[in-house]
Amino acid sequence: MFGTELDALAARYPNVVIDHVITEPDTDWTGPTGFLTADTIRSLVGELDNRMVYVCGPQTLYPYALGQLRALGQPRKRIRFEANGAPSDPAAQPHWPADVDPTEQVTVTVGATSFRTPRNRPLLDALEDSGIRPEAAFRSGECSLCRVRIVKGEVHTAEEARLRLSDPQFGYTHSCVAYPITDVEIDL
Ligand code: FES
């Protein structure tokens, strides 16, 4: 993601150094691979020496990233996380219906599969809990990779979602920041 743009920045500014670490590389990739482990970070940047570390990307990976950085002895106060992501309390948003309990469970149906999930769990996370893995990236409502169609039922789409103008009309939402208010049936 943004590989070309980042490389262009590095080419332009000598104090910017970019290392790409690819989890599932193409066969011609010769750089570092796998998860960004403490060992990989150490081999690429050496000692962190109390430098500030900024972590961005899917929030579900933050605990993992924190563990790797702490294993390198990085103080917690020198690690910052991107503020984006699914809202942790969707019911606090103004358009959450006042009479709907966010902790109650509803049924989500995808094709022949149905499962129960609390209303305040993002649809994308709930799908993954059930072994269904739609395409997704940043999980903050902006990239639209996790777009799904609501065939039946009602979801609360968080304010963070950057939907196309026509999405609501045709029932599309971004599952990373959408919460099932009623039983829903969705199309991936
Ligand atoms: S993962 Fe990008 S909008 Fe949901």
Image (spheres, grey):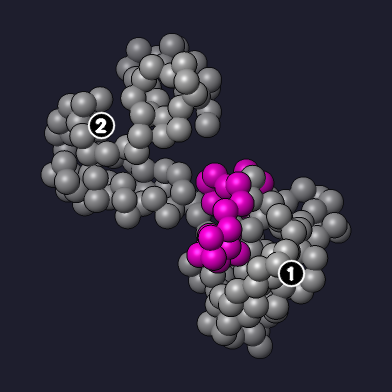
Q: Which residue is drawn at 15% across and 30% down?
A: 47
Which residue is nearer to you in this view: 182 or 162? 182
Q: Where is residue 5 in the image (x, y as percent from the top left)?
A: 53, 22
Residue that numbered label 1 is attached to: 185
- Specify whether residue 9 is in view: no
In reply to whether residue 123 is colored magenta, the answer given is: yes
* Quadrant location of the C terminus in the rendered image: bottom right
Q: Position of residue 64 (x, y in %)?
A: 31, 51
Q: Left or right: 152 with respect to 179?
A: right
Circle 1 Cα neighbour tier, 10 Å, few/some/many (<14 / 14–19 / ≥20): some
* Residue segment shown in magenta: 122-144
Q: Residue at x 42, y 30 (%)?
A: 22
- Specify whether residue 107 is in view: yes
| Residue 99 to residue 72: above or below | below
**Badge 2 or badge 1: first in the primary sequence:** 2
Cβ of mark 2 under 8 A from ligand 1: no
Q: Left or right: 103 with respect to 67?
A: right
Residue that numbered label 2 is attached to: 40
Q: Which residue is drawn at 80% across and 65% down?
A: 151
Instruction: Check disc 1 and give the amino acid type.
Output: Glu
Q: Are marks 2 and 1 in contact (CB under 8 Å)?
A: no
- Secondary-structure class at tag 2: helix
